[in-house]
């Protein structure tokens, strides 16, 4: 490691709150961590960066007690410790908020916040006290509208993220790890989140903040550690002073221009998807648009505007009360996923791990799920044919590692997204709906995903994209639809609108 890539801060006389030194972790056939170093000081917001597969998730699971390291030391508040399990981490004052939230949908907000350390009197759970305390934590997070007694399963993704943060605060943690906390939040909610982080830091709480949104690092971070291939590429970098180009170089080993593929000048095909007067009470109303073969249409709007619900209704996962969805002139039966898939509609959902992938199954099985009938003979799946077809897709999309027998849960976020795309390519879908296609995907893999989406459109697929990043919607799409409070405000070419205009529309609720 060069001196430039190892700017380890060592402030004389100040012992770091946390010092992880030489952390090593092996899994069968792979060395996930190869001597990682990380120092975090009380009151610091320390940003942890790296491409998918760099070792970030493994490192924070070691810190959280979910994995046991094979080498190295952890020093906490000046003493060497062993974090033998997740409860031990919490007992030390270390709380982790994972990107894939571990909430129980059937329990209330308050029950989830105090799960495992319930408030009780004489052996009986004190629900009133728990609700009151939960409400106070939610107010502290700037979300008093989240009711403590509502079931978590009824909350949107952003609401669940807030509940998970409140759970961490309930442990009075001295260090909180936040893994992609802004991924499901809109800009206003991100601003509230940053306000809470600054307040916690001012109180001496340390934050380890993981994000692929490099612009966030400069806004909220104090220091930066960059991981690459299971090693520390740089640590202790000043977040406000380190150029983005340098961070990208450290993450990838090369310079990457953060650009979108050029929009090809070509004649679009016939209309493939037609949405007419689509409505679901409380979610969206009277939405109409078309998508042609080879066209990429983006839906822009804030979290909760109805964007994801529109995609799920097109796919049949939700049933429209009014309106129709037609594919190639054929009207689909409302609320029937099977009918949509049979007509050629595919969906890559926002929560790919919980909604799209079977993590403990092989890559081959995950790719073939929508096409199992193609490989079935006499009630049995012909595994050789299934593997061969999956292998073709893995090579075509450059899924890494190129091992169709590997469990999908072991892949990085970008490669998991490719597996979901491969499923629908194998199915030869005509309409592909993508909800947050680059959520949790690093800057290098994003470029690959963008190119894949453009290639799919060039092959004649009608693509509909939803993203919380307005820049991404505009950069990827041929046409942009702006959604606010369930209403379609704007439908026009992507090169005739910019990010500021979209924000003006969604904030004011007025059509352009």
Image (cartoon, rainbow, N blue to C red):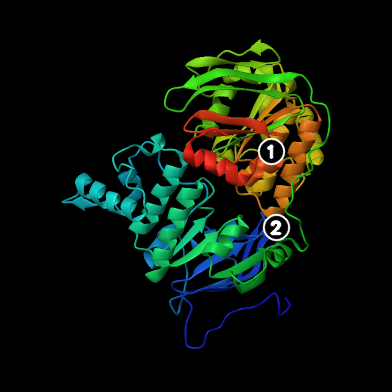
Q: Is residue 497 left or right of residue 426?
A: left
Count of marks placed on residues: 2
Which label number is shown at residue 35?
none
Q: Is residue 68 left or right of residue 477?
A: left
Residue 302 visible within the image: no
Q: Position of residue 59 (x, y in %)?
A: 57, 62
| Vertical arrangement, residue 463 with respect to residue 344, above or below | below
| Vertical arrangement, residue 23 with respect to residue 148, above or below | below
Q: Position of residue 206 (x, y in %)?
A: 45, 68
Q: Position of residue 361 (x, y in %)?
A: 63, 38
Dividing the picture into quadrants, the one containing residue 56 is bottom right
Residue 501 visible within the image: yes
Q: Residue at x 53, y 55 (%)?
A: 179
Mark-to-mark CA distance, 1 and 2: 48 Å
Q: Position of residue 202 (x, y in %)?
A: 40, 70
The residue tagged 2 is 30
The residue tagged 1 is 496
């Amino acid at each position: 490691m060069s001196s430039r890539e190892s700017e380890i801060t060592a402030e004389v006389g100040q012992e770091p709150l946390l010092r992880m030194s030489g952390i090593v972790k092996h899994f069968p056939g792979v060395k996930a961590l190869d001597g990682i170093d990380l120092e975090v000081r009380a009151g610091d917001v320390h940003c942890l960066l790296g491409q998918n597969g760099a070792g970030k998730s493994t490192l924070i699971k070691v810190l959280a007690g979910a994995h046991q390291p094979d080498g190295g030391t952890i020093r906490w508040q000046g003493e060497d410790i062993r974090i033998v399990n997740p409860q031990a981490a919490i007992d030390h004052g270390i709380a982790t908020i994972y990107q894939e939230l571990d909430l129980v949908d059937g329990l209330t907000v308050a029950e989830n916040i105090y799960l495992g350390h319930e408030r009780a009197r004489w052996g009986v759970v004190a629900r009133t006290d728990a609700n009151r305390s939960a409400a106070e934590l939610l107010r502290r997070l700037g979300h008093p509208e989240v009711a403590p007694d509502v079931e978590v399963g009824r909350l949107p993704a952003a609401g669940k993220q807030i509940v998970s943060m409140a759970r961490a605060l309930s442990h009075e943690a001295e260090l909180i790890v936040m893994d992609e906390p802004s991924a499901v939040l809109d800009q206003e909610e991100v601003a509230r989140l940053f306000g809470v982080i600054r307040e916690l830091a001012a109180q001496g709480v340390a934050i380890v903040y993981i994000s692929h949104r490099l612009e966030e690092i400069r806004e909220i971070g104090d220091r930066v550690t960059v991981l690459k291939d299971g090693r520390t590429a740089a640590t202790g970098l000043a977040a406000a002073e380190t150029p983005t180009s340098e961070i990208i170089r450290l993450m990838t080993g090369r310079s990457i221009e953060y650009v979108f593929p050029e929009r090809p000048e070509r004649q679009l095909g016939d209309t493939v998807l037609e949405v007419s007067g689509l409505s679901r009470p409380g979610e969206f109303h009277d939405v109409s648009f078309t998508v042609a073969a080879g066209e990429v249409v983006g839906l822009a709007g804030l979290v909760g505007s109805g964007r994801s619900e529109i995609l799920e209704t097109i796919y049949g996962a939700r049933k429209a009360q009014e309106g129709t969805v037609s594919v190639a002139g054929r009207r689909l039966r409302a609320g029937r996923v099977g009918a949509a898939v049979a007509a050629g509609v595919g969906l890559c959902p926002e929560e790919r791990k919980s909604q799209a992938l079977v993590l403990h199954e092989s890559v081959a099985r995950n790719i073939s799920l929508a096409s199992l009938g193609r490989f079935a003979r006499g009630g049995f799946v012909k595994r050789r044919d299934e593997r061969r077809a999956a292998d073709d897709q893995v090579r075509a999309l450059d899924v890494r590692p190129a091992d169709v027998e590997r469990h999908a849960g072991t892949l990085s976020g970008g490669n998991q997204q490719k597996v979901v795309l491969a499923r629908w390519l194998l199915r030869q879908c005509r309409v592909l709906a993508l909800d947050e296609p680059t959520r949790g995907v690093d800057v290098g893999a994003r470029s690959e995903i963008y190119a894949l989406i453009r290639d799919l459109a060039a092959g004649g697929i009608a693509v509909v994209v939803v993203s919380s990043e307005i820049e991404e919607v505009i950069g990827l799409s041929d046409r942009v639809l702006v959604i606010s409070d369930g209403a379609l405000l704007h439908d026009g070419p992507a090169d005739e609108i910019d990010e500021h205009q979209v924000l003006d529309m969604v904030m004011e609720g007025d059509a352009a």
